[in-house]
Amino acid sequence: MIRAALFDMDGLLLDSERVYAEAVLAVAPSLGYHISWDLILECVGTTSKATDIRYAQENPGFDSNALRNAMKSWLKEHRYDVAMPVKPYAQQILPHLKGQGIRCALVTSSSLPIAQQHMKAVNLFRYFDAVVTGDLGLASKPSPEVYLRAIELLGLPAADCAVIEDSHNGIRAGYAAGAMTIMVPDLVPYDESLASVCDHVCQNLQEAEDILLCR
């Protein structure tokens, strides 16, 4: 029986992975950095620190602050500095699950201030019984540390929890934590490399809700 649903944020509840990718592709050339679409996809689901390490490996002299500041300006110019677009059915799944007695946790590689800002802007932050963010010093996904911390905070066995993710890194993290895994692909599609670690693949969050309520 599933008693808790552990949600990623970027690319799952919010359409922010696409926005961030557009920002990186727009500003990186002006800074002299080559950051390809494939490199961006490789880093989906990881913390800013882990992403910066990969970007630096491909760009000698990489300055993460310069990139972040340029991205912030781009996001503000395009009116993404306060709120991000919401993914389909994100506004419905959280209150529906809570109404059925299923606890919810937010497990994101974004920082706590960013998670609070973006989720409060769309009135979703209040549905979470636990929040684990990328600025806690835990190992980045695909390490299971963030999901293990969320499961600990909820006080439930891992077998009673489901992880809902859009990224390969997130699915691997959820599986390693011992939870049921549900993938709702966003920028990175499902492929057979996940066959042993992904229990369900859904087209959208409504399908994911159906699975959670049937278990």
Image: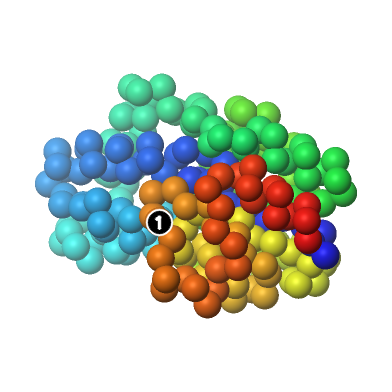
Q: Tell me if residue 41 comes above or below residue 25 in the rendering.
A: below
Estimate the x, y position of residue 171 in percent, counting from the top left: 53, 65
Q: What SS does tag 1 mark?
A: loop
Disc 1 packing (10 Å; few <14; some 14–19; many ≥20): few
Q: Quadrant of the C terminus?
A: bottom right
To which quarter of the image does residue 59 belong?
bottom left
Front-lying residue, 130 or 68: 130
To which quarter of the image does residue 78 belong?
top left
Q: Quadrant of the N terminus?
A: bottom right
Q: Residue at x 36, y 59 (%)?
A: 43
Q: Residue at x 22, y 66 (%)?
A: 57
Front-lying residue, 57 or 90: 90
Left or right of 36: which side holds 41?
right
Estimate the x, y position of residue 41 in percent, counting from the top left: 33, 55
Residue tagged by mark 1?
Answer: 189
Estimate the x, y position of residue 100 in percent, counting from the top left: 86, 46
Given the image, on which type of amino acid does mark 1 rest?
Answer: Pro
Left or right of 115: which side holds 124?
right
